[in-house]
Image (cartoon, grey):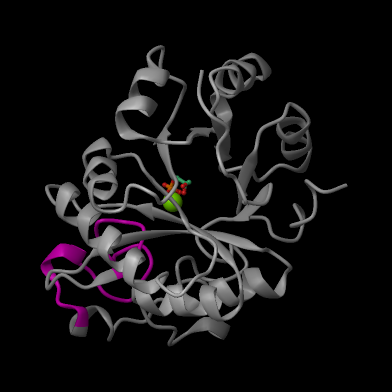
Amino acid sequence: SKSPVSWPYPAVIAHRGGGRIAPENTLAGLRCGYDHGFLMSEFDVKLSGDNVLVVLHDDTVDRTSDGSGAAAGMTFTELAQLDMGGWHSAWYAGESLPTFSQFARFILENGLLCNIEIKPCPGREAQTGAAVAQAVKQLWAKGGVAPLVSSFSQEALAAFAQQAPDVPRAFLIDSLPEDFEAILVSLGCQAINLNQKYLDESSIARIHAAGYKVCAYTVNDYRRARQLLGWGCDAIFTDELIRIPADLGVY
Ligand code: G3P
Ligand code: MG
């Protein structure tokens, strides 16, 4: 059976930086999570058209900015001019699109933990995985708790693993596949991150019996959060930083 995994991560993780109380995947959001006591944030990373690693969820900037178009078709200079905060609320108007290294700097300076979700633009899976690996090795060279790196893309995870095999990884997928152990072995993952909708107590037990951790996204209901943690789910991602507090898993 598998050797025990090193798992320094807390049970409640702020989703997309600061959940829904600030614009997703912005420095203001990341700071908001920190200010609400969250020791760990998840965020999404992809490459700009000119190969700068940026923090952005969608393939396009349409939903979360005042601009439009595919991120892969824009340079970082173009992306940096967008307003990423005004769609959320007037308070955050003018918030800019962060680079991955800005996020990493905030995390390292404040002793935080993070889950980097590699969210490649279509067709750029391997390139994005390799770029994130190079950046993580550089940015975490002087210490700091290793980030958990995850992706829905097996290609991105494989490319990441090739360059940074020692950085812990999770495979993201909606529901638990029959052959999950084979996938986790082939990608060298320590965890599987599943949609909370399809997660039950017996699946959690199966994953644990195989020697892996399990995280659930995105848990925004308080009772559901208590239930999943009570079943032994190792971590949950939440947008509700106030109703689902960072220390829910501790008490
Ligand atoms: O990484 C957990 C969760 O963020 C996965 O879904 O679409 O919110 O990135 P999504
Ligand atoms: Mg994500």
Above or below for 201 versus 161? above
Residue 228: image x %, image y %?
A: 71, 32
The residue lying furthest to the right in this view is 251
Residue 20: image x %, image y %?
A: 59, 62
Whether the magenta-drawn stretch holds residue 69 is answered as yes
Q: How many marks?
A: 0
Whether residue 205 is visible, yes or no, is: yes
Above or below for 42 versus 104? above
Closest to the observer: 162 or 233?
162
Above or below for 230 versus 245? above
Closest to the observer: 65 or 222?
222
Residue drawn at point x = 44 percent, y = 73 percent? 104
Q: Quadrant of residue 101?
A: bottom left
Residue drawn at point x = 24 percent, y = 78 percent? 79
Whether the magenta-drawn stretch holds residue 182 is answered as no
- Looking at the image, residue 136 sits to the left or right of residue 43; the answer is left
Dominant SS type (magenta): loop
Q: Quadrant of residue 54?
A: bottom left
Above or below for 186 versus 181? below
| Region rendered in magenta | 54-76
- Looking at the image, residue 53 sits to the left or right of residue 113; the answer is left
Residue 235: image x %, image y %?
A: 63, 42
Residue drawn at point x = 47 percent, y = 85 percent? 93
- Looking at the image, residue 78 sits to the left or right of residue 222; the answer is left
Closest to the observer: 119 or 204?
204
